[in-house]
Amino acid sequence: MPSKLAISYARVTKSFGSLRAVDDVSLDVADGEFVAIVGGSGSGKTTLLRLANRLIEADSGTITVEGQNVRDVDPVALRRRIGYVFQAGGLFPHLSVADNIGITPNLLGVSAADIASRVDELLDLVQLDRAAHRDRLPEALSGGQRQRVGVARALAARPRIMLMDEPFGALDPLTRDALGEDFRGLHRKLGLTTVMITHDMTEAILLADRIAVMRAGKLLALGTPAELSKSSDAYVLELLRTPRRQVERLNALLPTSGAA
Ligand SMILES: Nc1ncnc2c1ncn2[C@@H]1O[C@H](COP(=O)(O)OP(=O)(O)OP(=O)(O)O)[C@@H](O)[C@H]1O
């Protein structure tokens, strides 16, 4: 059992009307851990993620962040401690890259000069050329660049925890791979705790320390890829088999000495 928990869900339930979106979920995320949440559409992944920063309030159960019950923390203060990256970047379209990244430091009253140097530092961190990107509007960026800005913005207030909702889902496979790897590097370098939703089991296996499998609001399984491969649940095994099946099909179609 990890000694220090970044996020802990204890018997958490959230319903929308008669639908139990999150159903009696208990999940501990250790400090510094990278957890991927996988599961079908509507299985409760986004709801689970948003309960941690109080974008959604739980009906019952307890959620603690760095040992504090989230109910005892002002939601705005809580969200400044936790970076959040949306699927589509979630950038403000009328604000430049620099203003998007600087939005939270600005709200926190950081001086313009300090914000400018922080923006440059964050652009370096997410590997975007400062001069070329600082003043652009989001519409003038590629999808991958937008997601890099989204990550930079989420890191601006130096959070120790990052929540990511399908951050790389809308990108082409090569960009997705590169961003995933780069983010995993940032996670390590900055000592972050990351919880990332993904529909891609290969991405989950390659990036995460442990994988949480959701189904119909329940946490069906939780473990390292190796642990999950020993699961007795047919759905979990099916999910885990998908990447290997794809590789087998690819191997059958591509010459083995090919570029792959
Ligand atoms: N604000 C809401 N009002 C009513 N129902 C909601 C609301 N938010 C989510 N739901 C429902 O709760 C269930 C879980 O939704 P959630 O977004 O958490 O699933 P998900 O696993 O993230 O799905 P996806 O992979 O498609 O994003 C779904 O049936 C969804 O329709």
Image (spheres, grey):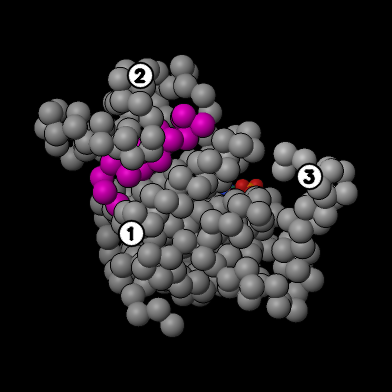
Residue 120 percent across, percent down from the top left: 25, 31
Give the residue drawn at x 45%, y 47%.
183
Question: Residue 152: in sight, yes or no?
Answer: yes
Q: In whole angstroms, how far apart are the C-alphas of marks 1 and 3?
A: 39 Å
Q: Quadrant of residue 219?
A: bottom right
Instruction: State the quadrant of the C terminus.
Output: top right
Give the residue drawn at x 44%, y 69%.
29
Residue 76 percent across, percent down from the top left: 29, 48
Disc 2, disc 1: CB below 8 Å? no
Residue at the right extreme, as displayed: 252
Q: Is residue 60 above or below residue 181?
A: below
Horizontal placement of 29 versus 223: left or right?
Answer: left
Mark positioned earlier in the residue sequence (2 or 3) = 2
Give the residue drawn at x 20%, y 28%.
116
Q: Return the residue at label 3.
A: 257
Q: Label 1: how many residues lie within 10 Å, few (<14), some (14-19) or many (20+)?
A: some
Give the residue drawn at x 19%, y 32%.
117
State yes or no: residue 59 in magenta. no
State yes or no: residue 152 in magenta. yes
Label 2 CB less than 8 angstroms from ligand 1: no
Q: In whole angstroms, how far apart are the C-alphas of marks 2 and 1?
A: 28 Å
Instruction: State the quadrant of the N terminus.
Output: bottom left
Q: Is residue 137 above or below residue 5?
A: above
